Image (cartoon, grey):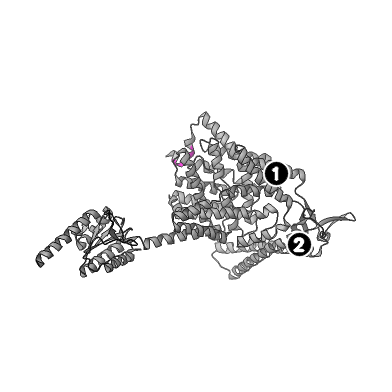
Amino acid sequence: MLTRFLPFLNWFPMRADTLRGDLIAGVSVAMILIPQAMAYAALAGLPVVYGLYASFLPVMIASMWGASRFLHTGPVALLSLMSAAAIEPLAARGSEEFIALSLTLALMVGVMRLALGAFRMGVLINLASHPVINGFTNAAALIIGLSLLNTFINVPMPRSDMFLRDLSQVILQFPLAHWQTIAFGVGTLILLSLMKRHFPRLPGVLIVVIIGTIISASLGFEKTATVSPAQIEDGPARIAFEDYARLEAQLAQTKQAQHTLNQQLRSLAKSERKDFMLEAESLRLAGEEQSLKQQLYGLRVAVHRFALTPIEVNGTTVYRAPGPDASWFADSWRFAGAKNGQIKLTGGGQVVGSIPAGLPGFALPGMDLGVISGLLGTAFVMALIGFMEATSISRALAAQSREKLNPNQELIGQGLANIVGSFFQSYTVSGSFSRSAVAAKTGARTGFYAIISAVGVIITMLYLTEYFYHLPQSVLAAIVMSAVFGLIDFKSLRHAWRVNRSDGVVGLTTFLATLWMAPQLANGVLVGVVLTVLIYLYGLMQPRSEVLGRTADGSLVGMSGRDLSPISDKYVVLRFDASLVFINSAFFEQAVMKAISHFPDAKTLLVIGNGINRIDATGEDKLRALAGDLKSAGITLALSGLKKPVREALDRAGLDRVIGRENLFPNKDIALKTLDAQYASEAGTAAAAAS
């Protein structure tokens, strides 16, 4: 009983070789976890330090209360992107509101996973079929990688409600790309590939981070300058920059007004009063906020097109448009932001910047009911997708180690990790395939290795954050790209098409729907699940049913499409391969009447019921009505091979007396012999009478 509530007690007593294996695995995973966590936090639209926060307590909680000893929990690419996509319509990336909503979403996902595990609802994973998961995973991997293309080339990306349109805007900005940023990204991809091929045991991710940081600091990769509008001598550029700064200031004022108004509405709600004027003003401000955001997203791309060249004039640096002969490699400065009437320009690439040192403090996630209701659907899909991801990883590793898995316990562990983490500034986490695989390969024996990896993160947060200042953002983007592009597997979709065309359609539809509906990835999964259910219901409504004939070797096969003679002129044999329930009872009736219409001289209809696993009240009623109608037409209904539960249901309903016990046969062989003998005897009697 104690280990049921405290599963980590199964780790003890721990032998020396077990501790040594966990120590090596924990250190190995920590070397991958730290740079990955920062990269995934950037993908989630958060400052990189929040990736480290998500790699601390959640890792420990999930390993202590989870079911798999190999599964490593923490930031992952898919849920990072889904978190950003869900919150972006509500707040600007990197803002305090965006961060607060990310923590709230983590709490919601955690509560849902914990509830599913506590009520033993792990079977819900079966709602998403294998083709749905394949289609979604391929599309999501493609979207994750391409969503970082703007960081890879250092251009802004508009954030609208359609990812493909935003991606096209990034592609159109290729002529404005920053060549040094591209060099860091391409170099990272090449180095990661070489490390994986020739030195697979070394922590390639950590090595590229260290090398990239050192080169960036040596070259002065980051170049920034804060100037007054008067220093920008290019008129159109100055006007565009000032327009952007004005819209940003208006957005800040609108959000402050919304905050004040929401406080007033909450106070009224506590006293059960309403103020319709305030509610109307809240709706107006929400519309104004969305309008300002859309204007800013479009204008951010426009202002980036202005390239400026710094020139010294009378001891003052001014910025002018470059001459017509300026090359792509020329020193050009572009807009980076505006604050307090000053304009920030950048002449280099983007780096991680200052990372706060120290451990995350305790803070309550936001509990705004309006926001929670808006995120509810996405949180549920994220809870299921994260669980599917974690379960598939655990199953793959358990198959090698013959470890027994408990999906409901894994749900509890993942739920607790997100709940506890959300109170200590962690966003949504789940199981990681790459880190779990490294743990298994390097000799992990128990979940204690994850605790050791979390200790490595603690040491980094306390003492090493200052050394990551010059880490280029394009290096982090390349790390994520390298990880997710390896997940793309179109062979699985092609294989599903070969096995079953309907499964291939489901996988392809899910893939295309996810791409089209991005950044709202959850909608792609819902489309796949709904299509799977519809195809399944269609199969139930029209199951396989055919009249049987006899081949030359005496076996019974369907007559459709074959040149076969009927078994007999006196009786028809119909095979029905499905349970007889409400959804297909009408189809069963049509199949029976169609068979009778093709054999007008038949006196008996034999239904081979080996495939009827269940019968409900509607099916029983349809069978009773058919027996009566056929009897009125001079045709006897006979059944063979009924399973025990179906036969008992007919007995309880008294249908055995309606059909006649003599017409219920244990199997088709006895039924055929009996019918052959019966009609041979009748033929003999008729011949004798005629004689």
Seen at 12% across and 65% down, the residue is: 686
Residue 88 at x, y percent in the picture: 61, 58
Is 360 or 518 nearer to us in this picture? 518
* Residue nearest the observer in this picture, 329 or 429: 329
Which residue ends up furthest to the top in the rendered image? 16
Q: Is residue 53 on the magenta stretch?
A: no
Q: Please state the horizontal and vertical placement of residue 560, each as a whole percent of the image.
A: 33, 62
Most common SS among magenta residues: helix
Disc on res. 369: none
Q: Secondary structure at mark 1?
A: helix
Residue 378 horizontal side relative to residue 246, left or right: left
Compared to residue 367, the image places residue 199 above or below, namely above
Which range of residues does the magenta coloring cover? 4-8
Q: Is residue 84 visible?
A: yes
Q: Quadrant of the C terminus?
A: bottom left
Q: Image point 12% across, 64% down: which residue?
A: 687
Crowdedness near tag 2: few (<14), some (14–19) or many (≥20) residues, C-alpha within 10 Å: many
Q: Quadrant of residue 4?
A: top left
What's under tag 2, amino acid-wise? Phe
Q: Which residue is mark 1?
A: 212
For marks 2 and 1, the one nearer the N-term is: 1
Dot 2 corresponds to which residue? 241
**Element type at marker 2?**
helix
Residue 164 in the image: x percent, y percent?
A: 61, 61
